[in-house]
Every structure is written in structure tokens, then in C-alpha cells.
Image (cartoon, rainbow, N blue to C red):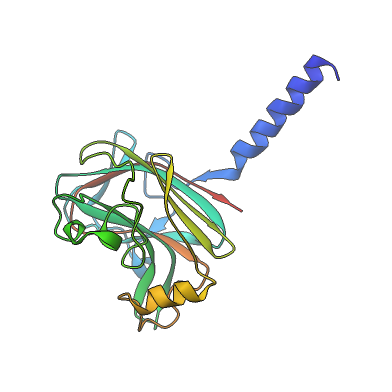
Amino acid sequence: MKASLFVFLVLGACRVIAADAVSLFDGKSLAGWTGPDGAKPGAGWVVVDGELHLNGEKGGNLLSEKEYTNFALEWEWKVEEGGNNGIKYWVTKVGGKEWLGIEYQMIDDAKHPDGLKGGSHTTASIYDIKAPAADKPLNPPGQWNSSRVVVQDGKIEHWLNGKLVCAADTTTDAWKTMIAGSKFKSKEGFAPGKGRIMLTDHHDKVWMRGLKITEK
């Protein structure tokens, strides 16, 4: 194979791979996101220097317009000291009342009251369901962290700063047992295997950037 043809094929493949990732935040607006039930996002969500910032005022939860089943979701984030936030996926309206889903926790483990509970309430946990690895590589408040959620055929992975720190298989009895021991035990239809992405509002300051998703 001629070198020029090889380079052409490689570059073409790279373009295809890159095209698979879709940005969920354009760095300029909240396009593609709504408040619950189609409401307008609250004033607390602002875009500053290409970053999505929840400034501590009332912003409300944000829902993606599209639903996802199998995907890889990536983003960077930081919280203020003592801050708390999270990203949820497979979010649906459970019981016709509550928008619920599996949450990737983002929190100041050392100073927020919920983080101080430890275990499944700390950063990168499957919130209130499964704790992350104790040796997870977490940067402190005010510094950027890189996170990734991978979902494939019911199997979920939570990554933090390049390391897999929490995983579960939602098709197993072990998952059912974990749900039965969580706050979601009475939420029939919780995390049905597909749903929207949710950026949560826990009334603390958070910054996010580089939100992108690749459907599998």
C-alpha cells in the first residue's frame, strides 16, 4: 500500500471516530437542554468563558432533549468548597411525578454533609447505590476533574480522572439487591435502561465543560 493512501485511510478513520462524539454543550448557550417538563432553564445556569456554570442562584435541573440507551458520556467539572452536584442518566418521569435516574455524584467529599456520609454518597459513586473505589484519584474543590460514564447493554462504569472507580451490572440480582437497599427501592420503573441526561441543581456552585456523548 502506498504511504499516501495509508495516510488517507487513517485520517479518514479518525474523522469517522471523531464524528461519533456529539457535543452536549456548545460553549455559548443552553441549546439542547430544558427544565423539567419543557420548562425554561432557571437564571442560575449561565455560560461564562465557554464554561457552563451554576452560580448558586436557582437554576433547576436541566434535561437533555434526547434519550440515550448505550453511550459514553464525558465531561470536566469542578465544585466550590463544600459544594455538591451530579449528573444523572437513564432519567425518566417515575410514577408520572419525579424525574429520576442513576447519578454520578460530584461533591466535596471532605466538607459537604452528604459527602461526609462516605461510601455511595461520595464523588464518582453510583449515588446511594454503590460506593466508588477508596483510592479514586479526586482533585480538590476549585480544581478540574475529568469524568466519564460508560453504559453498554445494562453494564455501567464510572470513571474519574482516567481511572475506572465504580461499576455495576443492572441486569443482575446483585443490582436488584443494591436498589432494594437504596432510597430508590419503592420507585417502580427507576432506571429502565434508557432515558435522558440530567444536570442537577443542588444549590451549590459548579462549573462544567467539554460535555460530549458517543452513542454505542
Q: Where is residue 205 in the image (x, y as percent from the top left)?
A: 19, 48
Confirm whether residue 216 shows in the render. Answer: yes
Q: Position of residue 213 (x, y in %)?
A: 51, 48
- What residue is rendered at 81% in x and 20% in y? 5
Label total for image: 0
- Asked if 169 appears above or below 143 in the picture, the reply is below
User: Foreground residue, 105 or 41?
Assistant: 105
Q: Residue furthest front?
A: 134
Confirm whether residue 60 shows in the render. Answer: no
Q: Which residue lies furthest to the top in this view?
A: 3
Q: Is residue 22 left or right of residue 4?
A: left
Q: Position of residue 79 (x, y in %)?
A: 23, 45
User: Foreground residue, 44 or 186?
Assistant: 186
- What residue is rendered at 16% in x and 54% in y? 57
User: Foreground residue, 180 or 42?
Assistant: 180
Q: Quadrant of residue 11?
A: top right
Q: Residue furthest right?
A: 1
- What residue is rendered at 76% in x and 27% in y? 9
Q: Quadrant of residue 28?
A: top left
Q: Where is residue 51 in the image (x, y as percent from the top left)?
A: 32, 39
Q: In this view, does 63 lie to the left or right of 71?
A: left
Q: Is residue 158 left or right of residue 110?
A: right
- Asked if 198 appears above or below 160 in the picture, the reply is below
- What residue is rendered at 34% in x and 80% in y? 97
- Asked if 183 appears above or below 61 in the picture, the reply is below
Q: Quadrant of the N terminus?
A: top right
User: Foreground residue, 117 or 184?
Assistant: 117
